[in-house]
Image: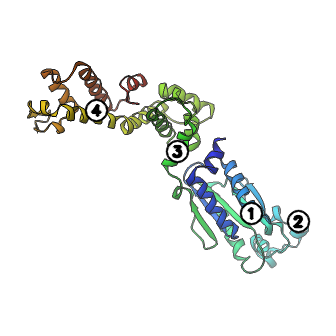
Amino acid sequence: MTGELWWRRLANSARFLDDLKDTLADDKSVLLLFDTDIPWLDIMTETLEQKLADANDNRTFDVLDVSKADDPGSYLMKRYCSKEEQKKYWPTTHGSPERFLGQNKVTPLNKRYVCLTDIKPDDASKWASSVVEYLENCEDVHEHGVFIIILDGMNVPGSKHLTTFRYNDYVTDYDCMMLCLTLVSDLKCSRAEKMYLCEVASNIAHNNVELAAMLASRRTNLIQNPYNVSAKVFEENEVKVTNLKERVRMAVWEAQIKLVFPKIENFRADLIRKYESKISRFLPIKSSNNDVVDKATDLEIGQLYFICRSQKIIDLPEFEMLKKMRDARNTLAHWEALSYDRLTEINLI
């Protein structure tokens, strides 16, 4: 599965869980901050649970969807106290439910890793404060519960009782690219085409790794017909986006600027290097801005085309390729993307 590949084999995402495991194994609660949607959350929690079981089999791992919980303290007390224990709780005597739980030696919470998911933005501070209050009342008393608070697109003030892990401190756009490249590693095409395919997938997905993986799995169909394939993937996975056509167009253009444009520049430089002595005879010339160009290496591809067309310096096949490269460069310079057929025709991928 792609999610298992991401959380168990990709270096930085796996390191994120390893560091998290080491902290939790020391009975320290953590705050996980994600700036974007959490990729394959179920696989992430399953992998973390297995890592912790390998390190410490004395605790049970609970994953709690708390999206419908209004009061964190009451929710945790009902979850981790028997009815008999709940009857012992009196607000005037014990204070908050968090304090009651923290000082309770028989609650099963003391033997739990508790992973809190689906916290609403408005409830983030409330949950963090509740867990901190619980931990404050556990200090030096007895074994206590260990919490994993997962926040998606939210932030809360830090606390000495919570070790903060920021997902983006570990995982970057590079990791999304590496995942896509791994998924298409068996594809029968050039390395350049694989790189281009993965760049297009990552760009369209805005580096959302789940979405990028789904796009990359469509293989060369994606770069042959990027809009239609993307529209189908977005529809099948109920991904809502405004103006998908423009998003795809810009994603493809940006991929070509990054990977294709340098090849056009390399072609220009190689051609000048090969015929520099002949080209130099027709210099200096003036650019469209009226600047004087007196060195062959400073010629833009359009100027090079003009000289080669009028002076017959290079062979006809080279001239035809120069014309195609000039046209391709002009297309990109005008914020337009090249079709897949044009890219393959002049061996740009």
Point out the frontmost of discs 2 and 1: 1
Between disc 3 and disc 2, whose residue precedes? 2
- Looking at marks 2 and 1 on the same chain, the residue that comes earlier in the sequence is marked by 2
Quickly name the residue at label 3.
178
Q: Are marks 2 and 1 in contact (CB under 8 Å)?
A: no
Q: Nearer the viewer, residue 88 or 22?
A: 22
State the image quarter where residue 156 is shown: bottom right
Q: Is residue 197 above or below residue 339?
A: below
Position of residue 66 measured from the top left corner of the image (x, y, whole percent): 72, 55
Which disc, if any, is residue 113? 1
Residue 119 percent location from the top left of the image: 66, 55
Proximity of marks 3 and 1: CB atoms separated by less than 8 Å: no
Task: Tell me the amino acid under the disc marked 2.
Answer: Ser
Label 2: state its secondary structure. Answer: loop
Residue appearing at x 70%, y 64% in the figure: 147
Which callout, 2 or 4, points at the residue further toward the start of the chain? 2
Q: Amino acid at mark 3?
A: Met
Identify residue for label 4: 267
Q: Nearer the viewer, mark 4 or mark 1?
A: 4
Residue 30, visible in the rendered structure: yes
Check whether the beta carbons of the residues at disc 4 and disc 3 lie within 8 A of each other. Answer: no
Name the image quarter holding residue 23. bottom right
Q: Which one is closest to the eye, mark 3 or mark 2?
A: 3
Identify the amino acid type marked 4.
Phe
Name the mark on residue 247.
Answer: none
Where residue 82 is drawn, which disc sits there? 2
* Colouring method of the image: rainbow
**Which sits earlier in the primary sequence, circle 3 or circle 1?**
1
